[in-house]
Image (cartoon, rainbow, N blue to C red):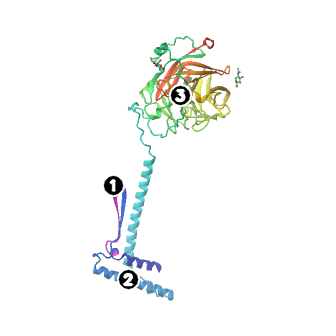
Amino acid sequence: MWVQLAVGLCCLLLGCQVQGRAASLRRANDDATGRCQYTFTVDSPAESSCSQAEEEGVRTRLALLEALVSRLLGEQGGAVGEAGLRRTAEEEEEVSQLQQDKERLNRQVQDLQRRLGELTVETEQLRSRPCHQPQPPHLSTADSDPAFQLGSGAFQEMKAELSEVPAPPQIQQGQNQAATGTTTQTTSSFSGCGVLESVQLPVTHRKADSITGKYGAWFQDPEPVGQPYGPKTVWRIDAVGKEVKQLFAYEDMEQLIRGFPMKVLPLPEAVESTGATVYRGSLYYQRRLSRTLIRYDVNTESVAARVDLPHAGFHGQHPYSWGGYTDIDLAVDERGLWAIYSTSKAKGAIVVAKLDHESLEVTKTWETNIRKNTVANGFMVCGRLYTVASYSLPNTTVNYMFDTDTNQSRAISIPFSNRYHYNSMIDYNPGNKKLYAWDNYHMVTYDIQLAESDSIP
Ligand SMILES: *[C@@H]1O[C@H](CO)[C@@H](O)[C@H](O)[C@H]1NC(C)=O
Ligand SMILES: *[C@@H]1O[C@H](CO)[C@@H](O)[C@H](O)[C@H]1NC(C)=O
């Protein structure tokens, strides 16, 4: 009964619109503000368009309403006859018209809600899309390599502090000239294991195309196993990005220079920074945001070992001076796999651990007196740790050596060149006795000379 009353009231209030054009909802674009404008129009009963006939209509409806009210009152007072509950034909018409209007308005509301939903999604997409990074003008614009597109978003936070050690004496002229070609004639005939005597100037092999290659890591396996990868295969990880999970494989140096990898291996866990290395058919790397070391078998493309490096600092606790979460640096030399890191017990001094390359278990550790955050990088050669003084000075030095046979460390000064002023990775390859480095988008190698231990002053 109340429903009928309500219907009647509506009839009355809507007046002429119900019979005529009814209420309307309109949407228009306001280009100036970029907003949508919604207009809800209700014709005024006072307008001249409300004709005499419509006034009659209103009167009729008023009468109907009165009848309804009296029926209601009658119901409250006692029994109401069946006939009283029956709607008149006029009432039925009004109700069905109102029903139609209601349905039409509902459809419009649904339409508007759907549009609103679409706009919300669109807004979210626009918001989450990163702004385009303008490429520094000195970068190559010919991005021939599809694998290196922007997209992974944020960069690893830089913690680099320019705490440089004074520039060493100039690199000797003789060495510079010898190293300008692609290969260098080594004057020393010594080919066994020994101490580092000199490092030639870098040879540039490839420049990364996109911002994701500002820093990274690249290698050739000194002792490859299995197929199809061999000693010529070049491995590369562009390390800029939050989720670094791609390992690029190039058939050889020529393919690296041409730019298209033979394969992109998807890594199961993201890589932290630039400390990875490749050895005996596996990529060894530190898992992002952890002290977990992962051995990823490149032939089976699966994780072969996963171990936490005990007590190792990670994610900015004990990085090299460059920063960039270089807390754990894996290295390979003639004796196998090593980790260069620090612990809270060592209070930031470099700890060297010898690792079993199969299981990744630590077989032995050494604590040095070299503060990790004062040096730019480190690498192992013949069981000795070497550190580089600066990652940015073009003329810097290999400044310390720690011998795991004698537990002795000593200051040295072997000239070393950061040609592109931002050296983020240095690894030794005992297979060809070269240092591999990633210097400000550039993949470079350095020839080195070793000498018998006691021939060094
Ligand atoms: C660095 O070494 C290069 C090559 O030996 C030399 O030409 C240059 O002048 C040196 N720069 C500084 C700042 O010592
Ligand atoms: C060097 O240190 C390691 C570990 O601290 C120890 O096991 C080894 O005996 C030491 N060697 C020498 C020659 O002092």
Question: Where 192 sits versus 360, above or below?
Answer: above
Identified by mark 3, the residue type is: Met
Q: Which mark sits nearer the N-terminus, 3 or 1?
A: 1
Dot 2 falls on a residue whose secondary structure is helix
Cβ at disc 2 under 8 Å from ligand 1: no
- Residue pointed to by mark 3: 425
Q: Which mark sits nearer the N-terminus, 1 or 2?
A: 1
Q: Position of residue 235 (x, y in %)?
A: 51, 28
Q: Which mark sits nearer the N-terminus, 3 or 2?
A: 2
- Identify the residue at image location x=50%, y=38%: 155
Q: Is residue 432 visible?
A: no
- Residue pointed to by mark 1: 32
Q: In front of the other: label 1 or label 2?
A: 1
Dot 3 falls on a residue whose secondary structure is strand
Identified by mark 1, the residue type is: Ala
Q: In front of the other: label 3 or label 1?
A: 1
- Residue pointed to by mark 2: 62
Q: Position of residue 108 (x, y in %)?
A: 38, 64
Distance (Cα) linking label 1 and label 2? 46 Å
